[in-house]
Each structure stands twice: as structure tokens, then as C-alpha cells.
Image (cartoon, rainbow, N blue to C red):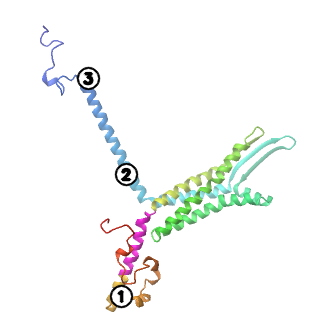
């Protein structure tokens, strides 16, 4: 019979685990697992909070981000087309060594001087014309994104298509460098190439930021039509307060907003009878609002 208080004596109730027989080691491991899970939950909550804060900061600072990206991108663009993009060095038997360094603008000049008009036009379009057109389209989209949201979405669709061709110069240069790096000839990428690559990446980021600033298409169209309807209703109320009667189609030219009204917004509704239901998008009911 074991002595009282010996090694085989059961633990007193105050020192037992939850089940009455849990050892100190098992209880310690369980406590460590609980602590780790608690720390993991706290870290996940903090990361979610930081992500939401970053999204809110980005949402309110999108204009500044867009301006910074556009200015930086086109500063890199003008540097990229004016600085040398590649250097070609080689030794040829009977002709000596060559050392050629060209920029995009110098290459264009050589193309047209030597009569290579087709490649010159292609390089001119993809390296110079497309980036400038993209800048102008981004400016137009930014200006009309609230006034004409549907047209802004259409222009953005076109912009995302033509933006793919601005990387053509980068691909051609990389392929040329890989092809010409032989035993007797060495090619080296210069600063102009990296400036132009930075322009391409930054302009892609600017396009994505501008895309995020556009309202959704159904909501944008509905908001535009609703604003026009409210504008018309305000003009009708003012006309009625001044003249004491509701306006009819003959009075329409005298209203001050005649030049800003879009007749296509209400193709089947006579003037003075338009309502909110007339401008509600198809499939949208009052209960869904």
C-alpha cells in the first residue's frame, strides 16, 4: 500500500485539471495553444483594420495618387524617348570595330532618312503617338467622369485597348538585345530603356487608378438622368411661381436650361409630364431602392 503523500498519491482537487486527471504538462500545452490562437486572431484583426484604413486613405487620396503617377510617368516618357536606349558594340574582320548608341528619336530619324517608312511609322505610333493620345484621353475621362459617365466608360474601354500597344517598343528592344548578343557583337541596354519601361508601368497604374474613380455604369447613368430630371423639375417650379401656371411645350424655349437639356433623355415623355419613373433604369423598381 503506497504511503499517503507518495508518488502515486492522486492530486488534490485544487491541483487537478478540468477533468480532474489532467496533468500540468497537458494543461500547459493547451494554454499555449489558446494563447497562440488569441495572438493570431489579434494579428488578423489588426491586418484587416490596416487594410481597411489603407483602402480609405487610397479612396480619399486617389486624385493625388493619380496626379503623381501621371506626372512621374510622362516625365519618364520624355526621358525615355530622348535618351539612348541601346548600345551595340562589335568587331568585324576587315571592317574594324563598331560602337553605335541610339535613342528612340534618333532611330526614327534614321528610319525615315533611309527610306524605311513602314517600321518608322510603326515605331512612331507605338512609342510617341499612343502615349500622347493616352494622356489626352485620360484627361478627358477625368473631366467628364461625373458629367457624362457613360461616355467616360466608353473612352476608358478604348483607352485600355490602345494602352496595350505602348509596350511594343519594349518587346522589340528586348528581342533585339537577345538576338544581337553574340560572340562578335555585344548589346547593352541604356538609361532610356529603363525610363521608358518605368513610364509603361506607371501609366498602367495611373489607368487603374482612373478606372477606380469612375462610378458604376448603371448607377452613373441613373444618377445622370435623375440629375437632369431634378433640374427640369426645378425649372418648372420656378416657371410656375413666376407665371402662376404650369409650363407647356410652347414655353420650353424660354427656360434657362434649354441649352443643357438632352432631349434624348426623355424620348417618349412630353415636357412637363416627366417623373422619376420615366428615368428609372429598366428592371429597377422603387422597392429596390
Residue 42 drawn above or below residue 283? above
Instruction: Count neighbours of disc 3 (C-alpha within 10 A) and say few if under 14, some if 14 to 19, many if 20 or more.
Output: few
Residue 163 drawn above or below residue 22? below
Instruction: Count neighbours of disc 2 (C-alpha within 10 A) and say few if under 14, some if 14 to 19, many if 20 or more.
Output: few
- Give the quarter of the figure containing the N terminus: top left
Residue assigned mark 2: 52
Range drawn in magenta: 214-233
Q: Secondary structure at mark 2?
A: helix
Report whether residue 108 is seen: no
Q: Secondary structure at mark 1?
A: helix
Which residue is rendered at x = 34% and y = 92% of the image?
243
Q: Earlier in the sequence, mark 1 or mark 3?
A: 3
Q: Earlier in the sequence, mark 2 or mark 3?
A: 3
Q: Earlier in the sequence, mark 2 or mark 1?
A: 2
Q: Between marks 2 and 3, how big is the CA–CA gap?
A: 41 Å
Is 213 magenta? The answer is: no
Residue assigned mark 1: 239
Is 218 magenta? The answer is: yes
Q: Which of 84 and 107 lies nearest the eye of the viewer?
A: 107
**Looking at the image, is mark 1 or mark 3 nearer the viewer?**
1
Q: Secondary structure at mark 3?
A: helix
Q: Between marks 1 and 3, how big is the CA–CA gap?
A: 87 Å
Name the spot of residue 121 as percent of width and height, x first. Answer: 71, 61
Residue assigned mark 3: 25
Amino acid at each position: 500500500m503506497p504511503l499517503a503523500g507518495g508518488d502515486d498519491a492522486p492530486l488534490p482537487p485544487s491541483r487537478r485539471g478540468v477533468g480532474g486527471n489532467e496533468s500540468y504538462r497537458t494543461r500547459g500545452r493547451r494554454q499555449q495553444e489558446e494563447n497562440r490562437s488569441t495572438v493570431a486572431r489579434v494579428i488578423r484583426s489588426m491586418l484587416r483594420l490596416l487594410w481597411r484604413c489603407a483602402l480609405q486613405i487610397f479612396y480619399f487620396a486617389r486624385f493625388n495618387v493619380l496626379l503623381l503617377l501621371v506626372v512621374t510617368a510622362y516625365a519618364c516618357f520624355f526621358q525615355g524617348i530622348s535618351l539612348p536606349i541601346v548600345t551595340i558594340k562589335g568587331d568585324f574582320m576587315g571592317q574594324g570595330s563598331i560602337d553605335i548608341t541610339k535613342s528612340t528619336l534618333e532611330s526614327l530619324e534614321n528610319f525615315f532618312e533611309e527610306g524605311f517608312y513602314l517600321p518608322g511609322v510603326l515605331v512612331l505610333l507605338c512609342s510617341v503617338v499612343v502615349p500622347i493620345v493616352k494622356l489626352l484621353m485620360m484627361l478627358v475621362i477625368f473631366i467628364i467622369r461625373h458629367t457624362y459617365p457613360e461616355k467616360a466608360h466608353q473612352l476608358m474601354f478604348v483607352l485600355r485597348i490602345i494602352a496595350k500597344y505602348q509596350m511594343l517598343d519594349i518587346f522589340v528592344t528586348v528581342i533585339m538585345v537577345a538576338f544581337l548578343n553574340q560572340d562578335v557583337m555585344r548589346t547593352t541596354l541604356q538609361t532610356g530603356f529603363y525610363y521608358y519601361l518605368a513610364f509603361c508601368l506607371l501609366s498602367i497604374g495611373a489607368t487603374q487608378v482612373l478606372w477606380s474613380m469612375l462610378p458604376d455604369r448603371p448607377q452613373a447613368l441613373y444618377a445622370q438622368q435623375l440629375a437632369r430630371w431634378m433640374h427640369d423639375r426645378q425649372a418648372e417650379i420656378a416657371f410656375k411661381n413666376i407665371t402662376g401656371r404650369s409650363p407647356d411645350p410652347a414655353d420650353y424655349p424660354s427656360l434657362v436650361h434649354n441649352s443643357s437639356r438632352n432631349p434624348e433623355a426623355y424620348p417618349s415623355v412630353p415636357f412637363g409630364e416627366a417623373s422619376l419613373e420615366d428615368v428609372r433604369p429598366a428592371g429597377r423598381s422603387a422597392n429596390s431602392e
